[in-house]
Image (cartoon, rainbow, N blue to C red):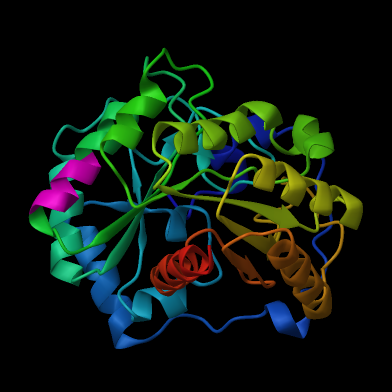
Amino acid sequence: MADQPPVLRHPEKAHRPDQPQPKKPAWIRVKAPTSEGYKQTRDIMRENRLSTVCEEAGCPNVGECWSQGHATMMIMGEICTRGCTFCNVATGRPDALDVFEPGRVAHAVAKLGLKHVVITSVDRDDLDDGGAEHFAQTIRAIRHRSPGSTIEVLTPDFLKSGPGALEAVVEARPDVFNHNLETVPGLYPTVRPGARYFHSLRLLQKVKELDPSMFTKSGIMVGLGEDRQGVLQVMDDMRAADIDFMTIGQYLQPTPKHHRVDRFVTPEEFKGYEKSAYGKGFLMVSATPLTRSSYHAGDDFARLRDARMEKLGRA
């Protein structure tokens, strides 16, 4: 699946004009994965017939993360019902849900000995609940097999789901509920056409209303055409929704058919974003060119928990 040419993998993008792919600056380049730990993680994923967003989305950090036994597992198949212009996950008609998948994910988590696991998925607008119950079953299966592991979910927006979808995931009690806003609202029509900015924001706000103790997290990419003021406004919107943790990373263009890279944001600018976000009250911020939603998620969760305890101690 990962090796399919863009026209087959992204039929909705086949007629788009090619966008130039600028040369990456030195700070964005990473080495090809070759370590023994990388191969072991890959083998466990293959044995359990599991998909990872690391591979499907072409993440630049796959070598580093897999070498340490970290992987973000992607449930509910490899085919998404949406066609976001930034994303390298294949678009089309998904297969039926695999009822044995939650158990296989739990087995892999136990075998890898993960202290912190991230579970994400494609969008499943074809399902009445958007796949919410499948998320909940996966969380429960991991809790059963690895009670000491902390669990982070990175969910779709459940935009077309019936009532109770979000509640089903929250009731399964993941430790972190993540849903990415991806970009500034003005770019949604071209970057994330099937989604709604304020719906996504409200989703995260509602998680806190359902369970105030649950950590919430969201992220955006930069280099899509936004400006600094737009990013600062997203920070304010996130804080108004009581989001604890914000990630900001550089957008990288998967193929010439995808949204163009407007520019490469410098490490110094990322530092400025990090400082601004902490100033606005986030408990945790990760803002670097190679930051992705799940990058260093385990270490970041420990820091997030410590930051809350410190804040409560000062209160």
Residue 184 seen in the figure: yes
Residue 153 percent coordinates (x, y): 39, 47
Looking at the image, which is closer to me, 216 or 131?
216
Q: Residue at x 88, y 57 (%)?
A: 228
Q: Residue at x 83, y 66 (%)?
A: 22
In the rendered image, which quarter is residue 141 located in?
top left
Image: 59 above or below 99: below
Image check: 80 left or right of 246?
Answer: left
Quarter-wise, where is residue 37 in the image?
A: bottom left
- Main secondary-structure element of the magenta-colored stretch: helix
Residue furthest out toward the left: 145
Q: Which quadrant of the structure image shows residue 54?
A: bottom left
Q: Which residues are magenta?
A: 138-144
Measured as percent of width and height from the top left, residue 302 is found at 39, 71
* Residue 94 seen in the figure: no
Q: Is residue 80 above or below residue 303?
A: above
Q: Using residue 176 as the reference point, say whether residue 174 is left or right of it.
A: left
From the viewer's side, name the closer residue of 68 and 140.
140
Using residue 154 as the reference point, say whether residue 186 is left or right of it.
right
* 91, above or below 290, in the image: above
- The structure residue drawn at horizontal position 82% and vertical position 75%, both measured from the top left corner, is 266
- From the viewer's perspective, is residue 21 above or below residue 206? below
User: How many numbered badges does the structure rendering display?
Assistant: 0
Q: Position of residue 274 (x, y in %)?
A: 72, 69
15 to the left or right of 97: right
- Of residues 50 and 157, the one nearer the viewer is 157
Q: Residue at x 47, y 66 (%)?
A: 304
Residue 227 position within the rendered picture, expressed as x and y whole percent measured from the top left = 90, 53
Q: Is residue 313 magenta?
A: no
